[in-house]
Amino acid sequence: MTDESQAAAVPSETRCGFVALIGAPNVGKSTLVNALVGSKVTIVSRKVQTTRALIRGIVIEGASQVILVDTPGIFAPRRRLDRAMVTTAWSGAHDADLVCVLLDAKKGLDAEAEAILTKAGSVAHRKILVVNKVDLVPRETLLALVKTANERLAFVSTFMISALSGDGVDDLRRALAEMVPPGPFHYPEDQMSDAPLRQLAAEITREKIYQQLHQELPYQSTVETDSWTERKDGSIRIEQTIFVERDSQRKIVLGKGGATIKSIGAEARKEIAEITGATVHLFLFVKVRENWGDDPDRYREMGLEFPRE
C-alpha cells in the first residue's frame, strides 16, 4: 500500500458526542442501548423504572464515537426516589449533544408520551424521533403516529425500529455517528461503558431480582458490590449486599430454604462471568436498611441527586 493510499484509508476527522435517550418507562431504551453497542451494558427488565442512573453505552461507528446516555424512564413522580430519577433523566437530555425521543409504537401518543413531547420542546438540542416496537402495529398506524409526532415537535430525523429484533438499528447507529460533532474520542476504543464493573455487576444482580420477584418486591430495594477480588487463578470473588426496607421483604428475597437467593445468585454469576470473561464466585447477602429511600448517601451511590423537598 502506498503512502497516499494509507493516508486515504485513515479518516481525516473523528467525531464524538453524547446522545440522550428519553422516553416513558418500558419504551425500550435499555434494549436499544444494548442493540446499538452490541453488548449488554444496561439492565433490561419487565418492571418499569429499572434504570436509575445515567449508564452510558459507547458505540464506535467508523470514525465516530457515540456515547449513549440511557436515562431513567420519565413518568409522573410520587416518591422522593421517583423525583430524583425524573430530574436525572431531564438533566441528561439538556446536557447531551443530541436527543433521541423514543415512542412505543403500540402505545402511541398516550398521556406519558404527550407529556414528554411537550417538555422535550424546551430542550435546545437537535431531536430525533425513534419509534420502537414497529413490528407490533400495522404500517398505517405507524405512519399516522410519525406524522402526528412530527407535527408536535421539530424532529430532524425519524427512525422506525425494533430494538429487540434489531430491525432499523444499524441505520440509526450510522445516522447518530454522522450527527455527533467533530472532536476527539472521550473513551478508549475498546470500552463499551463508563459504568465500573462493580456497578454493572450490582445492576445485573438487581435485574435478576426483578425477573424472579417482579410481583412481590417493590422498588425500595438496591444492590451494592461490597468487594471485588481478582484471585491468583484468574477468577473473581464478588460479595454483594441486597438491601430491602422490611424484614418481610428480606424473607421474600431469601425464599424457602434460601432457594430464591440461590437462583438469583446463579443467574447473576453466569452473566457477570460472560461480561468479565472470567470464572466468578458470587456471594449474596440480604440486609434490612429501613428508609434507605430517604438517605442522601444511597442516592449518591446510584449517581442520583438527592431531592431536598
Image (tube, rainbow, N blue to C red):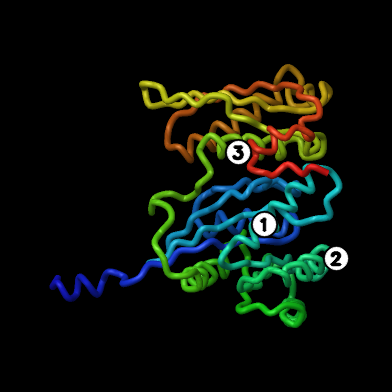
Return the residue at label 3.
Answer: 204
* Label 2 – label 3 distance at C-alpha: 31 Å
Q: Height in image: 236 above or below 11?
A: above
Q: Height in image: 261 above or below 203?
A: above
Figure quadrant of the N terminus:
bottom left
Q: Where is residue 192 in the image (x, y as percent from the top left)?
A: 47, 50
Q: Where is residue 168 in the image (x, y as percent from the top left)?
A: 57, 70
* Chain-order first, disc 2 or disc 3: 2
Q: Which amino acid does label 2 sit on?
A: Ala
**Between tags 2 and 3, which lies in front?**
2
Give the label on residue 91, or none.
1
* Chain-order first, disc 1 or disc 2: 1
- Front position in the image: 281 or 96: 96
* Label 1 – label 3 distance at C-alpha: 25 Å
Figure quadrant of the C terminus:
top right
Q: Looking at the rendering, which quadrant does residue 306 occupy?
A: top right
